[in-house]
């Protein structure tokens, strides 16, 4: 069942000191696919991406057990080595280098690429996807709007010529129009051949883009399946798509029995 | 007026040398967030190598060896101590660098003993006369070399891949790592560059009119600390400005000591710290520093 040598996460458990953040999570992203991970705040979505990109140690975390495979072989735990394998993460909250110009940010994204021709090609591609970045090339990144910063953040990651992109909440905090645009661009990037692991709270956007989806709850996979099936399932609709009968939308009252047990975000 | 011009040129020259030291200090802070108290002993190591080697291999080769040697010592401190130090806070690492500094300085002063080592430079005590103004050749060379190195450094910082990696790391280390930047290499190169710059500074701190390298040279190097701090610990521009301010103030205060007799003797040595305190009272982050240098 494991997809054509894409990303495979097997029984992954992650701890931050005494706190367990993920418990035996399994997930597969076949080559060329878009796979979404949904879940509330604190469900472990970002932790999952950190475990793949090797940045858990920046948060005093570590992999307790399990493994991450990419292209059929284990992914190393050092971020630079992960980037060299073509797996690049776009961090949550954009995290552009605000004191550097847009052009310098893109250059920073290509630091892991040795091949100059490949870097030039990547630059071409990024500026075609996001023409606004060419217009603002010499502006400080900190002065861009939120949407432009998100474009820069994705563009910067694409400069590293990824075969797999890890996106952490790319539409968070953006105006609906801009969010739709970013989503369309993600589809375009995927159509050009880059696999995508998309972490989102905005389930509607994510399920529209993805072929498969996983729902994380308190560090465990609660649900998984084809995106269309999940989008149609009552549980996902109620919890993550904000559609449901008025009764279930009401706060849980005393003695109301089994409803939305952990929906506390 | 003549005295003033002479003092100004000497002050700017000394300031440029302080700026070299402060620049290394700032580069290390930016790349690793460690306040590096080992800097004075890196400088002493570089100077010591030049002084010991020049009779054997000649002055220019000795300078190259001194620069390379200090760079290696810096890189070793990073590799053996800073990188291994799995301690929580950068404050603790700063204290560790004090320990390393004491070790290195103790050994080097033992080697130097009570000697005053000449640097074997070709400029000796020659002076250049421009009308009534007399300036030591060493001061002019120091100014020229320091300016050239600073410009080269700033250009590299702005335009090379190394510079981009360095600035990206300084701004957001985790995100830089996500771009494939090897943080270990960035940190190692910062320490090496700082060591090399310190060795050049050592040379110019120990040539005429200073008698030579002796055990007090490290104390002279300490004046670059107020330079870096008053400029703002995380600003290269600040290091330059701070260096110049400290150099000029110190030289002026020493030069006009006669008129400043009511302040007591040796006010020149205290001047850098007085300026630093005065500036920090009004701008706690330094002249060019980011308001809150510590990242969250």
Image (cartoon, helix red, strand yellow):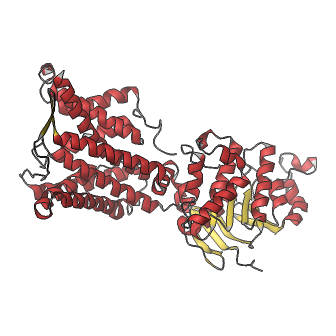
**Is residue A243 visible to us here?**
yes
Quadrant of residue A91 within the rendered picture: bottom right
**Between B182 and B211, the one nearer to me in the picture:** B211
Residue in the image at 43% along x and 37% along y: B289
**Between B144 and B223, the one nearer to me in the picture:** B144
Give the left or right position of residue B193, taking residue A74 as reference.
Answer: left
Q: Position of residue B16 (x, y in %)?
A: 28, 40
Q: Position of residue A68 (x, y in %)?
A: 63, 73
Quadrant of residue A56 within the rendered picture: bottom right
**Is residue A42 visible to us here?**
no
Above or below A235: residue B15: above
Above or below B196: residue A253: above
Q: Position of residue B132 (x, y in %)?
A: 14, 26
Identity of the residue furthest to the right in this view: A245
Q: Position of residue A28 (x, y in %)?
A: 73, 72
**Between A95 and B117, the one nearer to me in the picture:** B117
């Amino acid at each position: 069942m494991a997809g054509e040598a894409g990303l495979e996460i097997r029984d992954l458990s992650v701890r931050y000191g005494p706190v367990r953040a993920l418990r035996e999570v399994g997930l597969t992203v076949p080559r060329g696919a878009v796979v979404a991970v949904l879940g509330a705040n604190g469900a472990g979505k970002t932790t999952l991406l950190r475990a793949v990109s090797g940045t858990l140690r920046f948060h005093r975390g570590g992999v307790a057990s399990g493994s991450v495979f990419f292209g059929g072989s284990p992914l190393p735990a050092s971020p630079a080595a992960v980037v060299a394998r073509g797996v690049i993460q776009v961090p949550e909250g954009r995290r552009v280098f605000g004191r550097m110009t847009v052009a310098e940010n893109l250059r920073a994204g290509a630091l892991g690429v040795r091949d100059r021709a490949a870097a030039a090609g990547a630059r071409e591609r990024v500026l075609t996807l996001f023409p606004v970045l060419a217009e603002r090339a010499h502006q400080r990144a900190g002065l861009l709007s939120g949407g432009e910063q998100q474009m820069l953040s994705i563009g910067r990651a694409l400069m590293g010529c990824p075969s797999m992109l890890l996106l952490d909440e790319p539409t968070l905090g953006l105006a609906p129009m801009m969010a739709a645009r970013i989503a369309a661009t993600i589809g375009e990037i995927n159509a050009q051949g880059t696999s995508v692991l998309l972490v989102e709270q905005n389930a509607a956007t994510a399920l529209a883009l993805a072929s498969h989806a996983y729902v994380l709850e308190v560090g465990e996979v609660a649900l998984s399946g084809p995106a269309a099936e999940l989008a149609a399932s009552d549980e996902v609709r109620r919890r993550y798509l904000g559609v449901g009968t008025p009764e279930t939308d009401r706060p849980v009252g005393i003695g109301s029995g089994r409803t939305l047990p952990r929906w506390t975000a | 007026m003549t005295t003033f011009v002479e003092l100004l040129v000497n002050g700017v020259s000394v300031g440029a040398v302080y700026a070299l030291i402060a620049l290394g200090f700032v580069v290390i802070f930016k790349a690793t967030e460690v306040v590096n108290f080992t800097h004075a002993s890196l400088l002493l190591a570089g100077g010591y190598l030049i002084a010991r080697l020049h009779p054997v291999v000649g002055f220019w080769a000795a300078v190259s060896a001194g620069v390379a040697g200090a760079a290696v010592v810096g890189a070793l401190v990073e590799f053996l101590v800073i990188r291994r130090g799995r301690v929580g806070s950068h404050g603790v690492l700063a204290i560790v660098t004090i320990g390393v500094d004491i070790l290195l300085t103790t050994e080097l002063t033992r080697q130097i003993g009570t000697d005053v080592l000449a640097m074997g430079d070709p400029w000796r005590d020659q002076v250049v006369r421009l009308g009534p103004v007399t300036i030591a050749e060493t001061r002019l060379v120091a100014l020229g070399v320091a300016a050239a190195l600073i410009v080269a450094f700033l250009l590299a910082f702005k335009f090379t891949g190394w510079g981009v990696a360095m600035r990206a790391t300084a701004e957001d280390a985790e995100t830089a790592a996500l771009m494939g930047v090897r943080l270990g290499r960035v940190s190692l190169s910062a320490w090496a560059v700082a060591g090399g710059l310190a060795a050049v500074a050592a040379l110019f701190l120990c040539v005429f009119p200073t008698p030579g390298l002796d055990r007090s040279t490290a104390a002279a190097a300490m004046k670059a600390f107020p330079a870096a701090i008053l400029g703002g610990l995380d600003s290269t521009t600040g290091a330059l400005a701070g260096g110049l301010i400290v150099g000029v103030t110190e030289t002026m205060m020493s030069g006009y000591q006669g008129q400043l007799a009511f302040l007591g003797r040796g006010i020149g040595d205290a001047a850098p710290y007085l300026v630093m305190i005065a500036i920090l009272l009004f701008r706690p982050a330094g002249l060019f520093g980011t308001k809150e240098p510590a990242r969250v």
